[in-house]
Image (cartoon, rainbow, N blue to C red):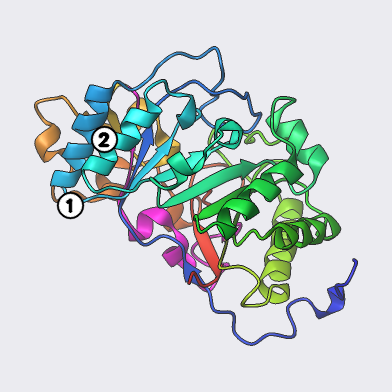
Amino acid sequence: MNGVDKGQIGQQRQEPALQSANTNDSVFMFITRSCNLTCSHCYVSAGPRLKGNMSLDIFGEVVDYFLRQGINDFRLTGGEPTFHPEFDLMLDLLSTKGITPRLITNGIRLMKMQSPQFVLEKVSKCWISAYGVNKNQHRAIGGERSLALEDILEFVGRQTMAGHWVGISVLLTEVSLDDLENFLVLAKKYGVRYLRFLFAEPTGRAMSSKVAFAYGDRTRDQAKIVFDYLDHSITSDAFDFLSLNNPFDLNTAHKLGLASCMLGSRSMWSISPEGDIYSCCFNIYDPVHKVTNVLSDTAGQALSNNNLVNNYAHRCKGLNSNYWGSKNSAVACPISALTLSRSR
């Protein structure tokens, strides 16, 4: 591999400074089912033909409901959140309440705005999606309407250098270390400072269901190589934030163990466009995991003094090493995460 001695991977650095990336209670607002892309990996199968936008009234009710619970970490997602016809009004509403949400976006509308700062100044963090570490993988999963990978890197770097917290969320399928190194070289070239990596199936689509990120032995071995490369080949000042979803058995195969499991260290809620509340963002639209509706008579007490895993996420096997209950023994939690270099 160019510039990298593979034989040195995992041998040169001292004990890595790893930490769980999951620290705060959070609310994922699925404000629309619509999207301007039809990505093959999308676990809610969003697309231009799907209907369903959260009304501004329900949006306000949800925000006030969680503020009363002492939770103010809101993350706007979808579908494509900027595709919502009242997206700008939602940002304004949050701003009047002193809330700066996080944004998860494919970046298409944002990058075509004359003044994307209008959005970026109202969010605390913005993650823009990339669907591979080379242009062919990115286009194969994101489709022909997805933005060019290098255009995303250039935009993110430019906004970062302008003082905005904008990062790239990168899907990893079958990854060569050469491609990964070339991607990181480009990211550094354009001034990208925040990166996170998520493992998925080679096609981008989950194996056995729309949320089951399962790994065979070959894929898990590859994940370990990628982890070691990132952990041992990235200098501490290369990026301000770098994280990787945990591709290993949460209980036994990694030193952080359960500390990397999102539900092991936080409460995490997802809200449908109709105001239904679910446990965990990957459980969205699964009736088994519906907790309540924000407008229901029982909503007031639904989250009080709850045990998220035991009461609502009862199919979650993450604390017993197999998050999604797959028959494949080599399964990782797709929402667990390791911070490889500390956020500044």
**Secondary structure under badge 2?**
helix
Residue 329 visible in the snapshot: no
Q: Amino acid at mark 2?
A: Leu
Disc 2 to disc 1, C-alpha distance = 18 Å
Q: Position of residue 155 (x, y in %)?
A: 64, 46
Figure quadrant of residue 84: top left
**293 in relation to 101, above or below:** above
Tell whether label 1 touches label 2 (CB within 8 Å).
no
The reply, left or right, for residue 278 in relation to residue 295 is right
The quadrant the N terminus occupies is: bottom right
Residue count near mark 2 (Cα–Cα under 10 Å), binned few <14, some 14–19, many ≥20: some
Residue indicated by mark 1: 70
The residue furthest front is 114
Q: Position of residue 119 (x, y in %)?
A: 44, 40
Please give the name of the residue rendered at 10% of the width and 36% of the height, measured from the top-left corner. 300
- Magenta span: 244-273
> Residue 118 lies in magenta, yes or no?
no
Disc number at residue 93?
A: 2
Q: Amino acid at mark 1?
A: Gly
Q: Which is more toward the observer, 303 or 102?
A: 102
Residue 273 visible in the snapshot: yes
Disc nearer the start of the sequence (2/1): 1
- Number of numbered discs on residues: 2
**Secondary structure under badge 1?**
loop
Q: Which is more toward the observer, 312 or 172?
A: 172
Please give the name of the residue rendered at 32% of the width and 32% of the height, measured from the top-left corner. 90
Please give the name of the residue rendered at 75% of the width and 25% of the height, measured from the top-left corner. 144
The reply, left or right, for residue 7 in relation to residue 172 is right
Q: Position of residue 72 (x, y in %)?
A: 25, 49
